[in-house]
Amino acid sequence: MARLESIENDFQSFLLRGSAEIEKRVVGTQRVPIATRLAIYADAYRSRLIEALEAQYPALLALLGAEEFAALGHAYVQAHDSSFASIRFYGGALGAFLAVHPDFAARPWLSELAHFEWAMNDVFDAADAAPLDVQALGLIAPENWAELGFDAHPSVRRLDLLWNASALWRALTDGQPHPPPDAQAHPVPWLLWRRELQILFRPLAGLEAGALDAMRQGRSFGGICLTLATALDEAQAPGRAAAFLREWVESGMIVGMRTCKE
């Protein structure tokens, strides 16, 4: 078993870093030398990882084109070992990689598009949960509201985007001419979630983004009101919080309630 583990480690070092130790354990022939035999496996391994990236980032692939995306894929594979049991999670760092790589960092919309696509993958793959019925809100006694906390659907994700990544994604995945990259003056909060099998996303106004973030951080309804009271008149905060909450419930984003002591 120890010898098998050693062989596996040497083979992995060859695939990931080009180590030559595995050559001592491989038999070559005149027709297929050791280097050729190993290259077949190495090329297949790298190709499989790049194919996974193509499946996870179809809009980015369409925007860059096959040749430049392949170059990106090779650079990413060279820099990132596959450390996950499932290849589904391998491309999670691509957005951060694009933001710092010298060949791509000058086009920051690429990084944001990758972050948006990865969030879409997470939303689609997230666990399912039955949404809360809006009628449940009417059954809450007034004295219990302040300490009531809410559980978001497992698919809920939040992003702050400076560029028009969602418009780029929509056009590219629909096979339509895409708009030019366009940056806002300030990052825009975005909400993504799944309702049944449908992925939904929309921008958030600043107040709703703050309230949603407070809810997802485990704050009670009273805590959400306090968050809103930093920007609103204190008397207005409960009504605005209640309106946000009703919208979240009606959109299928809330799956449970609980007592939340802060």
Image (cartoon, rainbow, N blue to C red):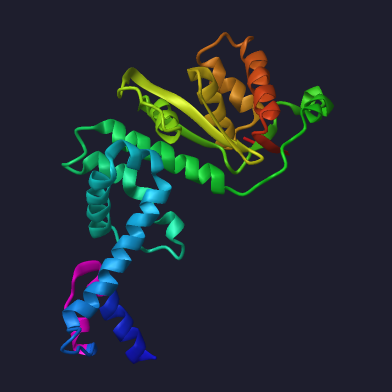
Point out the stretch of residues depicted in magenta. 13-24
| Quadrant position of the C terminus in the picture | top right
Q: Is residue 19 above or below residue 252?
A: below
- The secondary structure that dominates the magenta segment is helix
Above-or-below relation of 172 to 123:
above
| Residue 16 occupies quadrant | bottom left
Task: Tell me, yes or no, if residue 260 can be seen here.
Answer: no
Q: Quadrant of the N terminus?
A: bottom left
Residue drawn where x is 72% and y is 42% of the image: 130
Q: Is residue 37 visible?
A: yes
Residue 90 x/y as whole percent? 39, 56
Q: Could you tell me residue 34's position as x and y percent?
A: 18, 83
Image coordinates of residue 245 in percent, x first then y, are 66, 24
Q: Is residue 14 magenta?
A: yes
Q: Is residue 39 rendered to the left or right of residue 157?
A: left
The residue at the point 47 percent across, 27 percent down is: 190
Residue 145 falls in image quadrant: top right
User: Which is more toward the observer, 121 or 233?
Assistant: 121
* Residue 100 falls inside the magenta stretch: no
Q: Is residue 18 shown left or right of residue 193?
A: left
Residue, x 23% and y 32% (percent of image)? 107
Residue 106: % across, % down: 19, 33
Q: Identify the residue shown where x is 23% and y is 77%.
A: 38
Q: Quadrant of residue 4?
A: bottom left
